[in-house]
């Protein structure tokens, strides 16, 4: 199978690379899954992926209000091929001769043959949401969304 059992057959790896003096680096990696139709734009679940361990580490609760209360049963699952996809995205970004292309958003799938890319674009809208993203910020945002920022009576 392309991905382990429990993942939607229609999925997308959303990789954002950033050009640095040392070469392209991955800014973030998100897996969009649980797609009820043929397109990953119908995703009902998103997860942050740790590139080194290829593991889903947190739900993408920060992405949009519809994701703040999503169930996250796949946290802890591995995404074999995620690291390879990131290495390929960085290599492709490094190969670009467009000096102004500082951020690229890459869309890929994991297939039986490995990562398959179907798009690379200027990541103008994705990048601001990802610049300061960390696991602790993602957890803090999810907690804030649960209460919609309301302070407790004791505060």
Image (spheres, rainbow, N blue to C red):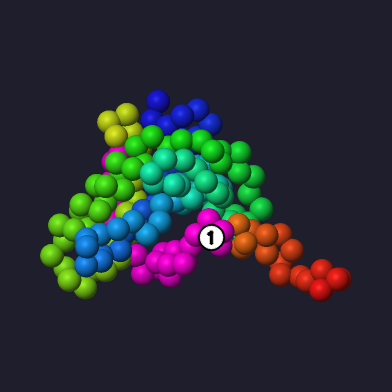
Of 127 and 111, the residue lying toward us:
127
Q: Position of residue 60 (x, y in %)?
A: 54, 54
- Which quadrant would the N terminus be assigned to in this image? top left
Q: Position of residue 79 (x, y in %)?
A: 42, 37
Location of residue 123 with respect to 79 vertically, above or below: below
Q: Position of residue 112 (x, y in %)?
A: 32, 29
Where residue 2 sits, quadrant-wise, is top left
Of 153 and 120, the residue lying toward us:
153
- Which quadrant would the C terminus be assigned to in this image? bottom right
Left or right, 93 with reference to 64: left
Query: Is residue 108 located in the magenta-colored stretch of the structure?
Result: no
Left or right, 129 with reference to 91: right
User: Residue at (64%, 58%) from the top-left corner?
Assistant: 142
Of 112 and 36, the residue lying toward us:
112
Name the residue beneath numbered marker 1. Answer: 63
Left or right, 131 with reference to 60: left
Can see residue 39? Answer: no
User: Residue at (24%, 47%) from the top-left corner?
Assistant: 88
Location of residue 95 with respect to 129 vertically, above or below: above
Can see residue 128? Answer: yes
Furthest-right residue in this view? 153
Of 52 and 9, the residue lying toward us:
52
User: Residue at (20%, 52%) from the top-left corner?
Assistant: 91
Furthest-top residue in this view? 1
- Secondary structure at badge 1 equals loop
Q: Position of residue 75 (x, y in %)?
A: 56, 41
Residue stretch in magenta:
115-138
Query: Is residue 118 located in the magenta-colored stretch of the structure?
Result: yes
């Amino acid at each position: 199978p392309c991905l382990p059992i429990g993942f939607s057959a229609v999925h997308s790896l959303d990789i954002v690379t950033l050009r640095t003096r040392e070469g392209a680096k991955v800014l973030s990696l998100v897996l969009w899954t649980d797609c009820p139709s043929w397109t990953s734009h119908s995703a009902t679940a998103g997860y942050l992926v740790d590139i080194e361990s290829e593991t889903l580490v947190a739900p993408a609760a920060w992405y949009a209000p519809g994701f703040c209360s999503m169930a996250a049963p796949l946290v802890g699952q591995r995404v074999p091929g995620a690291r390879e996809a990131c290495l390929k995205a960085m290599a492709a970004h490094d190969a670009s001769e467009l000096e102004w292309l500082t951020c690229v958003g890459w869309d890929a799938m994991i297939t039986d043959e490995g990562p398959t890319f179907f798009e690379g674009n200027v990541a103008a809208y994705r990048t601001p949401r990802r610049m300061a993203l960390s696991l602790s910020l993602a957890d803090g945002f999810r907690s804030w969304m649960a209460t919609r920022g309301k302070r407790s009576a004791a505060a």
